[in-house]
Image (cartoon, rainbow, N blue to C red):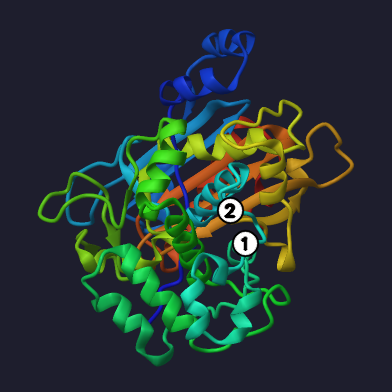
Amino acid sequence: MNRVLLVVVGLAWSSTTSFAQSAYSETDTKAMAEIPAALDVSTQLADLVAKHQVPALAAVLIEGGVIRVEGVAGVRANGTDAKTTLDDQWHLGSCTKAMTATLAALMVDRQQLSWDTPLFEVFPKLAETADAGWGKATLGMFVTNTSGTPGGLDRDGLWDRLWNTNEPPSEARRMLIAGVTKFPPIAEPGTKYEYANGGFAIAGAMMERTAGLPFEELLRRELFGPLGITSAGFAAPGVPGVTAQPMGHTKEGKAVPPTRAGDNPMGIAPAGCVHMSIRDWAKFAMLHARGDSRNPNRRAEVLTPQAFDWLHTPRLQNYAGGWAVTNRPWADGPDEDKEGFVLTHAGSNTMWFAVVWIAPERDMAMLAVTNIAGEGGPKAADEAIQTVMKQWGAGRSDEVTK
């Protein structure tokens, strides 16, 4: 059965310095060096861990490129006394989708691909076996959930084959493409929204075929490298037999070791299999907060301004390039009479839960993560977001996640 993939995190001031120095002027950097240490909300998060009975919880608020509030509490695995830290790695679930879309934008910037590149142009032989309806499906549609890709991958035993294959992830994605496209799209490409992990996996396959490198290597080299992200990996973090990293948990609270069963099949890695430290993930959130045209301190890094504009423009069902788009009163920036623009996403492989909110007009982002899903994980993460906002006094914290 398909697992729903949806994401979160927290970080520290010292970890953001190198990225900040590359993204801000000398004056900005000098001013940031004089900012006091971030407010620590670990005690408040510990209360939420107990309230919602989650193993661990971490959260952060970034404003102006600086970590203002952060905290972490709980244990890496239930039944152990291994405390979580802000340097631990967390599974980011479907917030991987924004990373995949960002990598696609980078390749579009370089004219290696375009948003209008058809699937059959990258895989010409596919046209011999695929339903003809896929001829209109493009890279841009795959990363905005409008390609006609179905929401599930169970048809004709495809999901089981993805689980059981021993082929490398890139080959598994070829298997996924063949399995999806042998049937017609669920709607004419470009005409219907359908949240689809398979669509992002296909986008990843288009990129790796074009570049001649596996998607995982591309993402590390072309996106994580420039951002200074060094802790990133794929599948559940850690190694079996030790408790050196947080573990995901079943809804009953049982720790799940980082074996093959600890995450979804790696063939759908572009849809939601990335893990990294919360400090590293914050660098990615900062990239999009500063890259948006609504940010009064806009500084487009890694991508062109036009690329950020494309990624942040909502299509059907207000879904953009790996982001859900909405508005909130607390995100209004200098104009208090309107609701501000917000990018958000959540993620879970049923064993972790994470969420991110980015308010470009406030030059601010808030992130939270926990190593369990079920009922308690989302509630704990939402309240963690409200906690960091309240502690910073940044707005109406009770309205953040509503």
The residue sitting at 24% across, 78% down in the picture is 164
Q: Quadrant of residue 61?
A: top right
Task: Using residue 309 as the reference point, say whether residue 107 is left or right of it.
Answer: left
Task: Give the residue at mark 1.
Answer: 117
Give the farthest residue toward the right.
337
Q: Secondary structure at mark 1?
A: loop
> In the rendered view of the protein, which quadrant contains the N terminus?
bottom left
For badge 2, the amino acid type reads Leu
For badge 1, the amino acid type reads Thr
**Label of residue 113 in the image:** 2
The residue sitting at 56% across, 34% down in the picture is 302
Q: Secondary structure at mark 2?
A: loop
Q: Please tell me whether residue 234 is drawn above or below residue 152 in the rendered image.
A: above
Of the pair 29 and 176, the residue shown nearer to us: 176
Inspect this view and state whether residue 254 appears: no
Q: Please tell me whether residue 316 is drawn above or below residue 294 in the rendered image.
A: below
Label 1: few (<14), some (14–19) or many (≥20) C-alpha neighbours in 10 Å: some
**Label of residue 238 in the image:** none
Of the pair 29 and 368, the residue shown nearer to us: 29
> In the rendered view of the protein, which quadrant contains the C terminus?
bottom right
Inspect this view and state whether residue 330 appears: yes
- Labels 1 & 2 near each other (Cβ < 8 A): yes
